[in-house]
Amino acid sequence: MNKNKFHLVKSKMTKLSSYHMMIVSKHFNTIKDFINIEFVSKKFNDNMKKFHFNPIPITKLTIKHFPNIETLHLYNKTDENFGNGFIDNLKNDNHDYYEEINKRKSVTEKKVFYQIVVWFGVGVDVVNRTISPNIKFKNVIYTKDDVTKFGNKIPNSVKTIDDYCFNRYNKLDCINIPPNVKSIGDHCFCNCLNLTSVTISSGVKTISRSCFSYCIHLLEIKIPLSVKSMADDCFYNCYNLSSVEISTNVTSIGNCCFFGCCALSYVTIPNNVLSMGKGCFFNCCFLETISIPSSVTSIGIQCFGNCSQLNSVYIQPGVEQFYYQCFGGCIQLTHVDIPISVTSIGDKCFFKCNSLTKLIIPSSVVSISSDCFPSNTLVIQEK
């Protein structure tokens, strides 16, 4: 940092009160940051003494800088815990075993804290084996091993359902995601061939990639308000999914999210959705009508490709581009409103849309790629 920039930053920082500097410093990454800030202004002296917990990992050497710590936060498994260990679940050559977390560390004189807060992920079995009442686990992960031991009733302490947790678990016919769960991992319920019913609580924020793909007997799904985006392949080839309620807070629908959901005849795209990924509704062969709100600026490649029963598409102004084969193979499509916001229409956009006998292109469209329309479509381009 050059001298002028340093003085500018220093000038801005000294305008903060000592209380506000403490709040800001919670986001520092290193002990050096904490030490340096105390040299910026006298009012920031003893900033570290104000902390009753460690905002960053500390060691036997750096704990002296936080003399008033009452609660020890462990952010990573390798953090110094000052003799406050617990039994952890470890793996070696695909073999599970349990071991005291400090067993292979150098002996440390135990320091007593009011509470130990563990932020790194641990399994349910680890929580169950922990005797000390002052250890609190903030990221309990339900794993494939936990499913083997405890079944499909997810404990309320769980915050994350692990990747592949229930993958190919064909004993599962229904699942209730408890309110404390924040994240459902990649391929979590993928290939659960007998799963028919899922209840997702309002605490879930993340539904990850291929989460319910190939759940061929899943009938309906309701996405809670807490979810802001739907990942790629989320409901890929859920053949019998006939009812979908997408949260009004969802802003993006990922690639191939509802690919092959053949039973889906109707879906409402919420007004906050900005983008719809490639192949998003590809081969949704019973989808009959779709309305795209003005918030959507991008409709991905083959987004509605092969929707063979789709007959009407209503698009509000907002979309700027139709990509490759966006509606390709929609053989029953008879009506499309192209809004004045559209500037380009991609290759084979209406490929094989032989029922589309007339299409009005607004004057805003400046680029029309090759083979956009069937030969029997009357294309009227406004001027």
Image: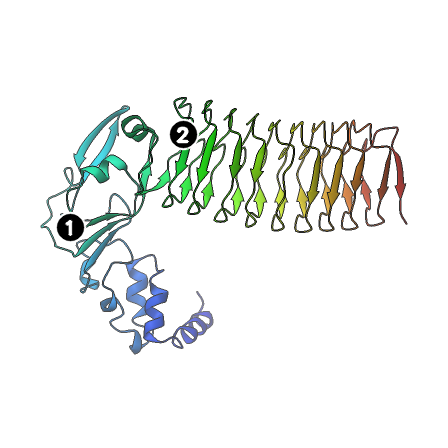
Q: Residue at x 71, y 38 (%)?
A: 323
Give the x, y percent position of residue 131: 15, 42
Residue 164 disc label: 2
Q: Nearer the viewer, residue 365 or 33?
A: 365
Mark with earlier residue (2, 1): 1
Mark 2 closeness class: few <14, some 14–19, many ≥20 residues within 10 Å: many
If the image is split into quadrants, where does the N terminus sit? Answer: bottom left
- Picture residue at 74% right of the left edge, 51% below the top: 317
| Relative to 131, 256 lies left or right | right
Q: Secondary structure at mark 2?
A: loop
Rendered position, 348 above or below 245: above
Q: Position of residue 27 (x, y in %)?
A: 36, 60
**Numbered circle sitting on residue 260:** none
Please state which of residues 166 and 311 is positioned toward the viewer in this rendering: 311
Query: Looking at the rendering, which quadrant does residue 328 occupy?
Result: top right
Identity of the amino acid at label 1?
A: Phe
Residue occupying the point 57% across, 49% down? 248
Q: Position of residue 115 (x, y in %)?
A: 19, 54
Res. 234 visible in picture: no
Q: Residues within 10 Å of mark 1 (few under 14, many from 20)?
A: some
In this orientation, does residue 221 appear?
Answer: yes
Q: Which residue is tagged 1?
A: 82
Q: Are marks 2 and 1 in contact (CB under 8 Å)?
A: no
Q: CA distance from mark 2 to mark 1?
A: 35 Å
Kindly report which numbered mark, 2 or 1, lies closer to the viewer in this rendering: 2
Task: Give the vertical position of 253 relative to 31 (above or below).
Answer: above
Secondary structure under the numbered disc 1 in the rendered image: loop
Above or below, 49 relative to 58: below
Say what amino acid the circle numbered 2 marks: Tyr
Residue 185 in the image: x percent, y percent?
Answer: 42, 36
Does 314 appear above or below 174? below
